[in-house]
Image: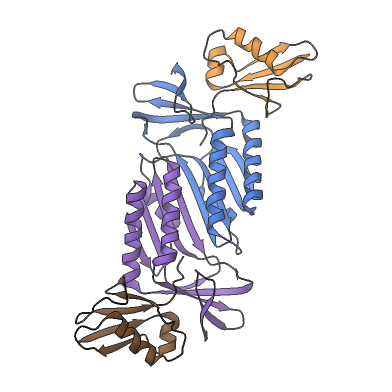
Chain colours: A orange, B brown, C purple, D blue
Amino acid sequence: MTVRVLLFASYADALGRPDVTMELPAGARVRDVLDRVKALVAGKRVPDKPLVAVNQRYAREDQALGPSDEVAIIPPVAGG
Amino acid sequence: MTVRVLLFASYADALGRPDVTMELPAGARVRDVLDRVKALVAGKRVPDKPLVAVNQRYAREDQALGPSDEVAIIPPVAGG
Amino acid sequence: MRAAMVDRPIDSAALLKEVADHRNGASVLFIGTVRELNDGEPVKGLDYSAYGAMAQKELGDIAAEAAEKFDTSDIVVEHRVGELGLGDVSVAIAVAHPHRGQAFDAARYVIEELKKRAPIWKREHYGDGRAEWVSAASKDLVGVRAK
Amino acid sequence: MRAAMVDRPIDSAALLKEVADHRNGASVLFIGTVRELNDGEPVKGLDYSAYGAMAQKELGDIAAEAAEKFDTSDIVVEHRVGELGLGDVSVAIAVAHPHRGQAFDAARYVIEELKKRAPIWKREHYGDGRAEWVSAASKDLVGVRAK
């Protein structure tokens, strides 16, 4: 299945772009996306367990993903 | 000595006027003023121990008064 | 820091501007307004009166205490006296601070102390022409007087 | 109740008007502004960016939670994104309530939760041309990037 992954702020800087589309096997979970992202940005400022959102809601590492889900890797927030 | 006594809000209503001037013996204290005021408004909505200010500062019943002091009897406040 | 009893409408936006400073990241404005219901009885309007000179002193003391406790001199408070209609602002407190916690706490301190200590009284006017002195502390009526 | 991410200046007086209601006796406005110093380094300006759709949802959730917890629907919050200069308003929260305690608490709840949960990021611009992503929670710099 195809999943769109969004990166923001310092994570987007680390990746060099604000999003990436991934082909994942059926049954893939949030942690599979994280593993791919960490490989892409190797060593560049993305922590081991960043905050993640799926379809604009905070999600856990073991949340299962479906086709056309939107996954976002969320740097430490700084609103206000 | 002469002391000016101010009354406000419901206390002024009870007295029928907002102030009264009293002749008091030297050494008079706040409680002497209160006794006189309570006699003037007999039974009319002034409690036994109302708040009192002397020269625009909250004062205790036993505070000694001097000539030309300004004494105020303060109803329950309701600012805000 | 400024504290004033006023007999004209309160401009709360002006108070916010007065405390603004580039060192401050947080501003809190509290405003008290005349509301329709006081324990169920429809209020048409209010008049506030005060022991003016003493109220001015108390407000100044309270602002100075808040400045000391919460470490900012960017505090302004104004309380209005006279006739007020529904929705009119009776009191406004503006505080600015580098940090939001202290901004909130200072504004809260000023309104709580003002309500306890400032010699200010309020008479509510009702639809039927009656008017009553109201005690904010107890919400008891402390006196009754026909208008 | 209303929550919005906006890319234009925030009109805090308009927010106060929006929550005003004759049943309410107390209004609290919180505004966050760009300040000069962040841990000692002079800030020339900021840009805020957000995961817009999610930030909008979180703000809406937070306002709804505050409405439920503090028993008022008179809550409005706006957060700005884009380039901001010194003193510009980045966030404003207005709450009105019959009682002041809940008005303060609801405003405080919204800003605290917003700072924890809203996916919004801030990059500070310094006098020497550098810019850095800032984490509000830790005040640590979470990334550095030449402008």
Relative horizontal placement of residue C87, taking residue B70 as reference (left or right): right
Residue D38 found in image quarter: top left
Residue C84, horizontal then vertical, whole percent? 49, 71
Tell me: B64 left or right of A44. Answer: left
Rendered view: D86 above or below C68: above
Locate the C terminus of chain D by quadrant: top left
Up-down: is C27 above or below D80?
below
Q: Nearer the viewer, residue A60 or B35?
A: B35
Query: Residue B38, image x and y in percent?
Result: 38, 88
In the image: residue B39, left or right of residue B30 = right
For this orientation, the residue located farthest to the front is: B62
Report the residue at 62% width, 33% height from top. D55
The residue lying furthest to the right in this view is A26
Q: How far from the left and from the top, in percent, is residue B28?
A: 24, 84
Q: Is residue C147 visible?
A: no
Where residue C57 appears, as percent x and y from the top left, is 31, 66
Q: Residue at x 59, y 53 (%)?
A: D18
Q: Residue at x 53, y 8 (%)?
A: A43
